[in-house]
Amino acid sequence: MRFRRRGLHIFAAGLLGLGPIAFAQNSTVLIPGPLRSFLRMAGVSQKAAPEDVLPLFARSVFIRGYSGGRPSEYLMLLDRYVAQARELQALAGPAGTLKVTSCTDAVPLLQILGYRIRNGCGKTTLLTTADPDRAFLTIDSGFPLPQLEEALQTGQTFTMPYTYSQVPGLLHEGDWFSISTSRRRGISSLIDAIVDDPSVARLYWAMSKLDPETRNVLLRQPGLRRLAPVSAVLDFYGGELTVRDNRVVVPGGPTSDNAWKDIVGASPQSPGDFILHLLAKDRGWTAAYFDSLSRASREEQVHLTEPTRMKQLYEAFHPSDSDPPATRGVFRRAPDILVLFSRANWAPDGTPHIPGDIDTWKHILADAPRNHATSEWAKHAKGWNRPEQVLQGMVGISRTDMESGPLQVFLQTNAIDRARGNAKPLDPQTVRLMASHFSQYANWFPLFAEFPELDNDSIQQFINTAQTVGGISNETLRGNALGSFQAIVGIWQVLARQGEIQPAMLNASWQHMLEPFNKVQNDTELFDHARESLGQLAMAAAGKPNCTQDEWISLLGGPNQSSREGRAMQQEMAGRIRSVMVDQRLVSLDTLFTLSDGLSALSQGTTTADKLLPMAEELREFEMPRAILTTMERIEWAPRGYSIRHAQLQARTDMTKLLKSQPNKQQLENARGTLAAFLRDTLVGLNYAYYEPPGAQMLHHNPVFVRAHDFTGTTVSSPERAWMIAELFGTGSPASGGAYLAGSLADLPFALAKSEQDFIVPENVQALIWRELVPELLVSASMPRWWEITAPEMHAAALYQRAGEDLIDLARKNPEVRSHVRSILEDRLTVGQIMTVDDAWNSKTASPPKIAPADAFYLASLYRTRFPQEQAWSPADQELEALSKEHPEESRPDRIARDFGVPHPVMDSSYGRDLLAIKPFPFFGGFSSRLFGESWDSNNFYWARLADELGYQPVMLHRLVPELTRRMTAKIFASHIEDWAALDRAMRETGEDFRHSIAAQKAAQAVASSAQ
């Protein structure tokens, strides 16, 4: 097989513009052999719909088929499989059946399969490898070789249907041959054209994502040949392209046509020219700008596409000659402009909201880390005097990927002001202070968007206190101080989120909690001030300065409940926390505080050492795992940097020896200081235990997991790591001392979920489950609590979903309703998802289109708001109307969205839960990959509906949501990185399995009852 890189032939074909070709819109493509085997070899999900097989196959070819311009092993195996399948097809003959009646008949088949017969015919017959390459393909494609061997041993006839598999194809196969630049002779099918030419594969995939009307227009003009050179741009940034009534649907609507004509160089009313110019201009960056605006909501587009503003923003976004193409790399570029356009904040007069003031942003740009973009805009910023110019600067910077640059500061401060309702915005001093420390505390600032009650003084106090704690020179003391400080802040966040600290007390309790940490000078002071800080928190939550460990666990388990079911669930949640604390062998707060008081009393002569010995011995109950390597072996093989020294120091602490030696006052004071390390671990353990992911293993089977947490960043030699989201280290090496997290406790639910996700075993062979998505699914199950959910609210959440589904079904028959429904869904669904709904509406089958539960809720809630005059369209809507009158507060869509939504720390810069009017984000690489996971927000809506329909009380969501989410994750069977349908399918399969299990339990109970 010969492969050829994309080169001048494709480029020349594009320039020559060989003109449009007459295309057939639908064709049938024949794939040699069973479809199941082809899907296995092509890396396509067995659950892919027939019409998706070839597009997904094409995507796999251009993504995985080439490395450095040369064919990968994947592609070579795939090509050899197709050749082998054709040989088997020929052997099967016109009847389409492989038939073996004897060993003689088996020889031709075995030669193709790469095997031969050993030990002759009969019971001792064995099939052994003759050609390893062919044998590998035989096994990997799933050929039933054991059945063939058994048939030969028993003398039975082996038969296997082996015919072509038929799948739908785009256009006519010959149309794709005509643009292929492969030099390989004998190309006879679309499969060959895709395998042999990555440009054909990528264009096929890109065209498959367009709706039929748009695709038809592009086929007429400019045609496949002229689209081939820009296939990468069409793939990355063409997903939102739509042509209606022979004009391109542009962001801003028809009133923006002239502005787009000026930007692109062609009119949207000439769709072929417009799209070709759009894809080709500025090395793909114009298309990236268009796509980002297209994905913004209609409300945002009204502001962003004002003609003058839109052209000025593009001038800011316009790439320089030295910038790389927008298609360089495996993933899309410029994720930040998509976030900026989706979550822009506007002043009442329609101008962009600027946190602080314009002068603030001049200083921020001047002080920003230097790269080409920030240096250039720092010069422009000197002349800024209007909010529009600041927004232009942020758009210009967005083209450069940065994790903590000025744009990230702009998004975060806007999120805080938006949460405050712009009534009490951040002042310039606070914005500048946040910007100057953003690289350190970026992962902590979303907390202030979740709790807008925390004022500017509270933000400044947090930064100043964090600077003080992080500036401690002694590394061991600093690590213990950072752990204790962050753990207490984490406990405050939990209690505030659960409503156990009253809103009116949030600000004061925050400031009182932080204050003691400004005084830490040594280990003893750390212990005392951490205890004082915890006492301030206890005062705010429990009304008393001292709480036992059981009382703390009870507070974290949930607020006091009035119902019997609620009290039982609160005890269950507390039991889960207690279980983690026991498995981590953490010393209780009661022991630590009582022992500290006893040491003080002993130094004053008011108690005896004998009374303290039992508590001192509790410190020794923890033991390190037995070392499997010698000291020299550890020195040679252990990874450099941090290991588990903190835990090792604790294991060597022997306070009983000290107490028996008649210590003096200074020794007793120092002994109290050694308790600071144990206190840190207990406080950190409470945080870990609260956010235990579904199916957690390390929290229960690695007893040093909490103690080994590296708060100082020693592992990666980066002090800033101490405040960033923790990462997992120490895996895969027996000399590492065990896996542990290095970093801060910010966004701890995500860090723990990321650490535990690999313990969930997929149910399907060759299942694709995204590492970037699963942690977000687990966070949506481990972080929320459901104490404030009432039965009417959960029932309303279920009714909204049913009403939305009924509305979708009604739209099939009613053109006016369809128009309204489509206009609402276009703010939540991508063009591809809308196309799926359109296909279902136009289908002759009776089944209604399916949309995700969160989308159904969104549709029903907005439809009722926008068209209140319309009569109820279904029994679910009628019931919802009655419920809204009886329970107006609990049926409010914004409350339901908040209670059943998910956190969006990257997309919305907040740890608060919500349902955003945003289309699913495409996949980005690097630190922006979380945008993809945060786009899926349907799980909790669906679990709530399931619980409501099965008659569960809302508090049971604490048990149901984690378990169902874990089961759903195991069922995911995706075909590609943005396969949203796979998530919906796994979620619904989990729900149906759960319904059946409950029905089976009820049936068994009924049988048992009747038998009695």
Image (spheres, helix red, strand yellow):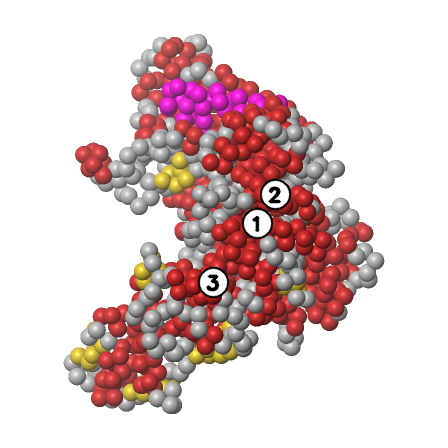
**Magenta segment:** 454-483
Q: Residue at x 37, y 10 (%)?
A: 666
Q: Visible in this render: residue 189?
A: yes
Q: What crowding class fits label 1: few (fewer than 14 Cα within 10 Å), some (14-19), or many (20 or more)?
A: many
Indicate the amino acid at tag 1: Tyr
The N terminus lies in quadrant: bottom left
Residue for badge 3: 15
Of mark 2 and mark 1, the one earlier in the sequence is 1
Q: Examine the image and state in which quarter residue 708 appears.
A: top left
Residue 470 within the magenta-colored segment of the rendering = yes
Q: Are marks 2 and 1 in contact (CB under 8 Å)?
A: yes
Q: Secondary structure at mark 2?
A: helix
Q: Which residue is mark 2?
A: 313
Task: Give the residue type at disc 3.
Answer: Leu
Query: Which badge, 1 or 3, comes first in the chain's sequence?
Result: 3
Mark 2 crowdedness (10 Å alpha carbons): few <14, some 14-19, many ≥20:
many
The CA distance from mark 2 to mark 1 is 9 Å
Of marks 2 and 3, the one in the foreground: 3
Left or right: 72 with respect to 359? left
Residue lying at the far front in this picture: please name it: 16
In the picture of the structure, the residue carrying the numbered disc 1 is 289
